[in-house]
Image (cartoon, rainbow, N blue to C red):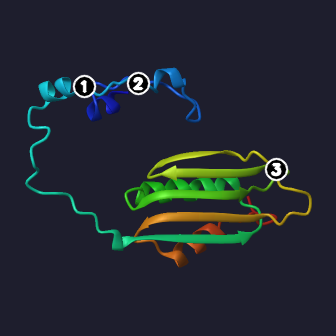
């Protein structure tokens, strides 16, 4: 909460679970107040000397898919390492996953930078459905071969722990 206050000290913090929030606390509040902003920052509307320029040519997306079931611990370690090393380069991540030992439970994840939401999908794997893991990474400086190799190393292999 302290970190949020550094971004906007006027904002009301509403705790949510899986992004579910009471709508009456966030809609129709008319909370934008010009006077309070100008009293906090009289130069709010002044032109910035240096405008931020976004080079969208650097942004790319990488989609990867392969069959099999992932080893949960190896996949979690891969994601932790990836986010620790590359969070600034990863704008969005999402995927559909099959984990060894989880029966017919299909898993999904989605993330923005280092914030990842992970859990079971609404529908399980169907009987006979191919267990295909699918990943999408959107960001800059993405290496498809490196990501594919690292993800394939997360596949469960009989006899290895």
Q: Local crowd at mark 1 within 10 Å, few (<14), some, or many (≥20)?
A: few
Kindly state the secondary structure of the residue where label 1 is placed: loop
Residue positioned most to the bottom: 145
Q: Is 59 situated left or right of 82 in this image?
A: left
| Viewer-side residue, 76 vs 13 | 13
Which residue is drawn at the image coordinates 55% and 56% (left, top)?
Answer: 79
- 31 w.r.t. 124: above or below: above
- 121 left or right, relative to 137: right
Asked which secondary structure carries label 3, the reply is: loop
Which residue appears at 15% of the width and 27% of the height?
Answer: 40
Q: What element carries label 2?
A: loop
Residue 143 position, x and y percent, is 48, 75
Q: Quadrant of residue 42?
A: top left
Q: Nearer the viewer, residue 85 or 7?
A: 7
Sequence-first disc among 3 and 1: 1
Per the rendering, the mark at residue 33 is 1
Q: Residues within 10 Å of mark 2 (few under 14, many from 20)?
A: few
In whole angstroms, how far apart are the C-alphas of marks 2 and 3? 34 Å
In this view of the protein, which residue sits in the foreground, 71 or 2?
2
> Could you tell me how far apart the alpha carbons at marks 1 and 2 are, in whole angstroms?
17 Å
Q: Earlier in the sequence, mark 2 or mark 3?
A: 2
- Residue where numbered disc 3 is placed: 124
Q: Residue at x 61, y 51 (%)?
A: 109
- Assess whether mark 1 and mark 3 are in contact (beta carbons under 8 angstroms): no
> Residue 138 at what x, y percent from top left?
48, 64
Which residue bears the numbered disc 2?
A: 13
Q: Quadrant of the N terminus?
A: top left
Q: Position of residue 95 (x, y in %)?
A: 63, 58
Q: In the figure, 38 relative to 94: above or below? A: above
For residue 118, side relative to residue 161 (left or right):
left
């Amino acid at each position: 909460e302290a970190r949020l206050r550094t971004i906007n000290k006027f904002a009301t913090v509403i705790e949510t679970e899986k992004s579910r929030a009471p709508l009456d606390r966030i809609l129709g509040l008319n909370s934008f107040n010009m006077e309070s902003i100008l009293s906090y920052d009289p130069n709010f509307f002044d032109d910035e000397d240096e405008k931020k320029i976004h080079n969208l040519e650097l942004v790319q997306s990488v989609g990867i898919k392969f069959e099999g079931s992932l080893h949960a611990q190896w996949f979690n370690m891969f994601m932790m390492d990836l986010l620790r090393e590359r969070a600034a380069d990863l704008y969005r991540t999402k995927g559909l996953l099959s984990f060894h030992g989880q029966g017919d439970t299909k898993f999904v994840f989605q993330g923005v930078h280092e914030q990842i939401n992970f859990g079971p999908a609404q529908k399980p794997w169907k009987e006979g459905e191919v267990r295909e893991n699918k990943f999408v990474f959107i960001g800059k400086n993405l290496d498809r071969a490196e990501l594919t190799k690292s993800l394939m190393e997360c596949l469960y292999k009989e006899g290895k722990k």
